[in-house]
Image (spheres, grey):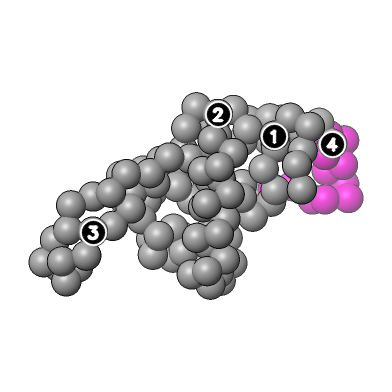
Amino acid sequence: MTHKHGIPGEFEQLVLLAILQLNTEAYGPNISAELEEKAGRRVSRGALYSSLDRLQQKGFIKWRIEAATSARGGNPKRLFEVTAAGVKALRTARSAFARLSAGLDEVLGESAG
């Protein structure tokens, strides 16, 4: 589903936020662990990587191959990074959420911040 301003869907937003949180440790398994720990979302490897592929196609993330290490059994790993377009999309989504939720504190309760 394509959005008018390229606002990523809810799960894609969570993935982008997890990548930003992890910074230089944003590898697939770490992203998955971050989503489970902070968002309470268990995600299969397949679902995560298909979402990462979609985000990359939209220009919201980029990745590079890190050199293989003996700790990983000689397997290289992909390090993900949110692009400027990805940050802009998150800002747009956050702003839309803030506008739509304005004045609804009584219904929604205060954020657990």
Q: CA distance from mark 2 to mark 4?
A: 22 Å
Q: Which residues are magenta?
A: 101-111
Could you say which disc has been placed on residue 76 in the image? 3
Q: Mark 2 or mark 4: which comes first in sequence? A: 2
Q: Position of residue 84 (x, y in %)?
A: 50, 27
Residue at which label 1 appears: 6
Residue under label 2, please give it. Answer: 85
| Residue name at image x 23 percent, y 50 percent | 66
Q: Are marks 2 and 4 in contact (CB under 8 Å)?
A: no
Can you give x and y, in whole percent of width and height, for residue 113 in the image?
Answer: 60, 47
Residue 3 appears in the picture as rendered: yes
SS of the residue under disc 3: loop
- Cβ–Cβ under 8 Å for marks 3 and 1: no
Farthest-out residue, front:
57
Task: Give neighbour class at mark 2: few <14, some 14-19, many 20+ (Cα, 10 Å).
Answer: some
Give how far apart the Cα atoms at labels 4 and 1 are: 18 Å
Verify whether residue 110 appears in magenta.
yes
Q: Mark 1 is on which residue type?
A: Gly
The residue that appears at 14% across and 61% down in the rendered structure is 69
Q: Are marks 2 and 1 in contact (CB under 8 Å)?
A: yes
In the rendered structure, which amino acid carries the disc numbered 3?
A: Pro
Q: Which residue is disc 4 drawn over?
A: 100
